[in-house]
Amino acid sequence: MEAEPQSTEQPSDQSSEQPTEGATKPSVGDALLAIEELWPESLAESWDTVGLVVGRPERSAAKILFAVDPTHDVISEALDWGADLVIVHHPLMMKPVNSVAASHFKGNAVHRLIEGGCALATVHTNGDSAVGGVSDVLADAFGLQDVHPLAQSADGLPEEGIGRVGNLSEGTTLGDFAGVVFSILPAVAGGVRVAGDRDAMVRRVAVCGGAGDSLFDQVRESGADVYVTADLRHHPVSEAREAARDGRPYLIDVSHFGSEWLWLTPAATALENVLADQGFTAEIRVSTVNSDPWDFVLTPGTE
Ligand SMILES: [Zn+2]
């Protein structure tokens, strides 16, 4: 896709967006610098695509919306509010594309954002790995102490990396801990699934926001009693349970969306603080859209 030819000078519409009451509004570029400070691109996995997806760095980013997914409903919410920038966790386009024609839903998303004057940026695995990232927030919410990454980041600090493991302040049963997980995460149709003895005691907990079935080896090495993650499929779970001979680590499968949604509010606060340190004031909101794709579930006794 070719960019529209333009002057490298600051566009004239910038001057019409002068700050009011002494507040200096950040540009999209200012927001990107703050994002880099909080969730550096160097922490992203090599296969990932993060950063600015749609938008001009010199345009205002006075109103910023955080969301998990760049879905149609999230973009509607952003445009209805008059957002200048949407920061999402999941990339809109992970694979290279040959077209952003609006006849495809992804191209349509690009068109709607551009036509609505709204930029889009992705903070994905860099947001997972960073201190205060997705799994750190989960560990915090579950009350874990002495927390470490499950897999350290290749280019990061010892406390940066994918997943986290830590200890509850005291042991509890798997059933009660699953209840805590259920109560903390947003309500979704699929609920929370557990593999393991409901009455078994657990204290050491591993967590990974999003799909974490690639980390079973690290979970076992960490000595975790239970592992909380999302998108657990039959074969990895079946084999992990066979290997554990029905013992530890037990598994708790939660909504992918839900496991990452908790991060949005602390992420919004962190961005607001970094922008404020740089003298900028932006209005920052967290999306109210539930982008978990499942709508209802039948279980024995409820069908
Ligand atoms: Zn995810």
Image: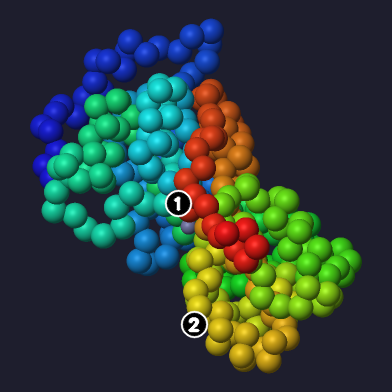
Quarter location, residue 265: top right
Q: Where does the image place residue 242, in percent across and percent down from the top left?
A: 61, 90
* Residue assigned mark 1: 293
**In the image, is residue 86 above or below residue 204?**
above
Q: How is the image coloured?
A: rainbow
Q: Amino acid at mark 2?
A: His
**In the image, is residue 5 above or below residue 257?**
above
Q: Quadrant of the N terminus?
A: top left
The CA distance from mark 2 to mark 1 is 22 Å
Q: Where does the image place residue 258, in percent across and percent down from the top left?
A: 57, 52
Point 78% across, 73% down: residue = 198
Point 73% across, 63% down: residue = 178
| Horizontal side, residue 202 vs residue 14: left or right | right
Point 63% across, 47% down: residue = 186
Q: Where does the image place residue 188, in percent across and percent down from the top left?
A: 58, 50
For the residue labelled by badge 1, is the local secondary structure a helix, a strand or a loop? Answer: loop
Can you tell which mark lies on residue 8?
none
Q: Amino acid at mark 1?
A: Pro
| Number of dots carrying numbers | 2
Q: Where does the image place residue 107, in percent across and percent down from the top left?
A: 22, 43
Point 37% across, 34% down: residue = 75
Decide if ligand 1 comes within 8 Å of the CB at mark 1. Answer: no
**In the image, is residue 284 above or below residue 128?**
above
Q: Residues within 10 Å of mark 2 (few under 14, many from 20)?
A: few
Quarter location, residue 301: bottom right
| Horizontal side, residue 81 vs residue 260: left or right | left
For the residue labelled by badge 2, is the local secondary structure a helix, a strand or a loop? Answer: helix
* Residue assigned mark 2: 235
Decide if ligand 1 comes within 8 Å of the CB at mark 2. Answer: no
Mark with earlier residue (2, 1): 2
Q: Quadrant of the C terminus?
A: bottom right
